[in-house]
Structures are given as structure tokens and as C-alpha cells.
Image (spheres, rainbow, N blue to C red):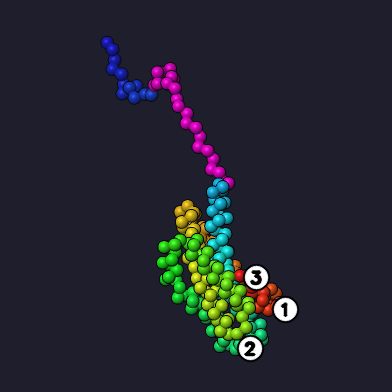
Amino acid sequence: MKLPVPLAEQLRPPSNGSVVDRLPVRVLPAAPAPSTELPAQSWRLIALVFLPFTAGYYLSYLFRTINALISGRLTSDLALGAADLGLLTSVYFLTLAALQVPIGIWLDRYGPRRVQSVLMLVAAAGAALFGAADGLLTLIFARLLIGFGVAAALMAGLKAIVLSFPKERVAFINGCMVMLGALGACLSIRRILLAKEGRVRFCPWA
């Protein structure tokens, strides 16, 4: 009489000599190790997008704080008082604030590269005029041109980064731009701007 096969024997996996064990096994290739080198496209974006817009933001910070460095020279050369210096400084911020809404419209319509290129030319003209000015009204107009020219420095850079870089790198690149641009407020240029030539040294920044 044949005894029934226990349930444990029925569920036991096949032995090494079974047909299943002799079937070929497909081995998948190992995933390649992630590369730590930046592709050529990334370096191209850094050189053509990140650095130019960061330089523009750097100059905007530099022009923002430059009056404090040259106030002594302005007072001695043009006999400006405290009220005149305050007006001269505030023109920059008033112009920059008034242009934020138009700047947003221009950036959406024409793109950051065109807007920033044109406005930086205006800022360069204002810087050159400021260095050659011989009166308060000329200084105010030059300062207005500078404020107009750098009004899009921050927003144009941020928009260019969003449009050009991968979305997973946008936050990091934005932080780098703000950090490097803010160095313009920390740069000590007293020896350059308060040299013998006075405001004439303002012209090279154009």
C-alpha cells in the first residue's frame, strides 16, 4: 500500500538537479557609477548665463553703496551738503523701486538677456556721466541713469537661471548668484575711488 506524500514534501523547493535549477539565469549589468564631472553644457551655462548676470547684480550692489565711499570727495569738490548727498543717494533707490513693475513686464515680453543688455548700457552711461559731472543736477541725472540701468539686475538674473538651468539646480544657482552679487557691498574700493583723480576713477566702472 502506497502512503500519501506529506504536505511538507509537496512544498519543498526543487533539488539542485531539477530542471528549474538547470535553466539559464540572465545577469543584469551593474548600474554605472554616477559621474562627478560637470558636462560641457553645464560649464557653457555657467560662462554664458551665470557669470554675466552675477556680474550685473554685483555692480548693482556696488553702485548702491558707493556714495558712502565718495561722500567726502563730493563734499570737497562740489560743496554738497548733507541734504544734497541724501537726495543724491535716494534717487538711485527711488528709480529702482519705480521700475520694478515695468521690469517684470519687459522680462516676460523680451527675455532677460535683451532687457539686461540694454539696461546695463544705460548704467554704463550713467557711471561715465557721474565721473565727469560738475554740478548737483548732473550728478542726480547720472545717478538716475545708474538706478535705471541696474533695476533689473536681480530679477533678470533669477529669470535667466530658471529658463536655462535644470530645475533641480535652480535653488543652488540662485543662492550662488545672490551670494556673489552681494560681495559688491562688501568690496573695499576706498583707495581706488578716493585717489588723486577723485570721481574720474568712477568712469572705469562703466
Instruction: Work out which quarter of the rendered image holds the N terminus and state it.
Output: top left
Secondary element under disc 2, as helix, strand or loop, is loop
Q: Earlier in the sequence, mark 3 or mark 2?
A: 2
- Amino acid type, callout 3: Pro
Please tell me which residue is depicted at 46% across the width and 57% down the height of the picture.
162
The residue where tag 3 is placed is: 204
Please tell me which residue is depicted at 66% across the width and 85% down the height of the picture.
77
Q: Earlier in the sequence, mark 1 or mark 3?
A: 1
Q: Nearer the viewer, residue 108 or 12?
A: 108
- Amino acid type, callout 1: Lys
Is 57 contained in the magenta span? Answer: no
Q: Which percent across, then down, holds residue 104? A: 43, 67
Q: Main secondary structure of the magenta part?
A: loop
Q: Which percent across, then down, holds residue 63? A: 58, 73
Determine whether, in the image, residue 166 is placed left or right of residue 51: left
What is the number of the mark on residue 79? 2
Give the residues drawn in magenta, as a range: 14-37
Instruction: Work out which quarter of the rendered image holds the C terminus and state it.
Output: bottom right
